[in-house]
Image (cartoon, rainbow, N blue to C red):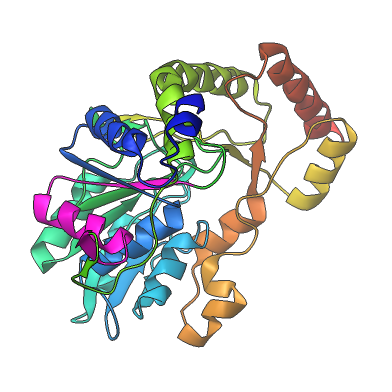
């Protein structure tokens, strides 16, 4: 950060290009394009694929709003497909029936830190001529059958929000692709539609990542693997000690999870359970209390019910987990959970 302050190139300074090369190498793809947020990354991915008015894009109803929001921002219509209850990930078995002649892409979300069955999603997309955009905002560093998150689809996107597995000191995001033409288009779109200064090829936007944030990420990236291993060790301690009838996260075979969140299922009144846990000195968080298809902004879509997403929304609870967390803090949480689990 001191180097950035010294040279003063706060927008598109050399650290941005350096970071993009490091991120592409880490993910294992030729092209990484940094942008100012994960939401911006999703929007630019859709725009680069020429998705707009009259198009449909399939995504999950159980996630942060960004994927569905980005679909609406480009003028397309989100189509929600329910989740698989053990993983909270998009149910691949329900995917094909949601495809129509207007469908142009699928946006699966790598929720809570693990990838969905992207090889199956890709196969369905290939049969129907669709693009796939992985929303890897919570899963950077995760892998499936040895392939990193953001490397397995037409475009992969991630977020560098401070709480993510790799976070900066503000908002930030990136897109990843193996397609050189798509990468070029993304770079043009993020910089007001210009490839060279003063010559505008398309209508773009201001989507550039600040150089200071690039410097932060360059400093943190070499420590990411260590941080992810610490997350996994803490998650394993939780899983080993979690009392019944609470349900630990399920990891799909072939996945290496990064536990962006450690999310359990609670039997009974989840909100009362969370309140009692807080009274015992342990904070927790609910991701996500209202599925997207039930949010006021999406009700006009007249989307059908998504029972598994609705059930998950009423039962999930995310426990404290971050790389600097002490093992003893896990045991404090487990002792509180054990007491609550047996208390009427």
Residue with the most extreme front position: 7
Camera sees residue 49: yes
Q: Give the total of numbered labels.
A: 0
Q: Reply yes or no: does residue 191 show up in magenta.
A: yes
Decide which of 170, 79 is in the foreground and name it. Answer: 170
Say left or right for 59 vs 293.
left
Q: What range is drawn magenta here? A: 172-196
User: Where's residue 141, x and y in %?
Assistant: 37, 30
Residue 169 position within the rendered picture, expressed as x and y whole percent measured from the top left: 56, 37
**Residue 123: image x %, image y %?**
14, 54
- At a point 65% along the width and 25% down the height, the residue shown is 242
Q: Quadrant of residue 46?
A: bottom left
Which residue is painted at 72% across and 12% down in the image? 328
Could you tell me which residue is drawn at 66 percent across and 57 percent down?
A: 314
Residue 269 appears in the picture as rendered: no
Q: Is residue 178 above or below residue 61?
A: above
The verdict on residue 34 being magenta is no
Where is residue 55? Give x, y as percent: 27, 80
Q: Nearer the viewer, residue 117 or 156?
A: 156
Q: Which quadrant holds residue 3? A: top left
In the figure, 6 relative to 324: above or below? Answer: below
Give me the residue at 46% from left, 17% from top.
229
Query: Vertically, is 153 above or below 319?
Result: below
- Horizontal relation, residue 251 to residue 154: left or right: right
Q: Quadrant of residue 317?
A: top right
Specify the quadrant that holds the C terminus: top right
């Amino acid at each position: 950060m001191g180097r950035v302050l010294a040279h003063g190139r706060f927008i598109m300074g050399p650290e941005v290009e350096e970071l993009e090369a490091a991120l592409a190498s880490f993910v294992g793809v030729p092209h990484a394009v940094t942008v100012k947020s994960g939401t911006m990354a999703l929007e630019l991915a859709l725009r680069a694929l020429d998705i707009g008015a009259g198009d449909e894009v399939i995504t999950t109803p159980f996630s942060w709003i960004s994927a569905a929001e980005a679909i609406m921002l480009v003028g397309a219509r989100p189509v929600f497909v329910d989740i698989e209850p053990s993983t909270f990930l998009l149910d691949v078995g329900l995917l094909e029936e949601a495809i129509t002649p207007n469908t142009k892409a699928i946006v699966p979300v790598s929720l809570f830190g693990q990838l969905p069955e992207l090889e199956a999603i890709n196969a369905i997309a290939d049969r129907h001529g669709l693009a796939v955009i992985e929303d890897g905002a919570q899963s950077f560093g995760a892998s499936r059958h040895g392939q990193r998150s953001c490397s397995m689809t037409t475009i992969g996107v991630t977020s560098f929000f401070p709480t993510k597995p790799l976070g900066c000191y503000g908002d930030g995001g990136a897109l990843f692709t193996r397609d050189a033409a798509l990468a070029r288009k993304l770079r043009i779109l993020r910089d007001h539609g210009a490839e060279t200064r003063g010559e505008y090829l398309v209508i773009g936007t201001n989507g550039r990542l600040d150089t200071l944030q690039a410097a932060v990420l360059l400093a943190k990236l070499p420590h990411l693997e260590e941080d992810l291993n610490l997350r996994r060790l803490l998650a394993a301690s939780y899983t080993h000690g979690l009392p019944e009838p609470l349900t630990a996260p399920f990891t799909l075979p072939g996945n290496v999870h990064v536990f962006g969140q450690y999310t359990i299922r609670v039997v009974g009144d989840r909100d009362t359970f969370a309140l009692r846990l807080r009274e015992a000195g342990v904070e927790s968080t609910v991701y996500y209390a209202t599925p997207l298809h039930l949010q006021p902004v999406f009700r006009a879509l007249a989307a059908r019910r998504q029972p598994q997403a609705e059930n998950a929304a009423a039962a999930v609870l995310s426990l404290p987990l971050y790389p600097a967390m002490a093992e003893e803090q896990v045991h404090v949480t487990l002792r509180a959970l054990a007491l609550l689990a047996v208390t009427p």
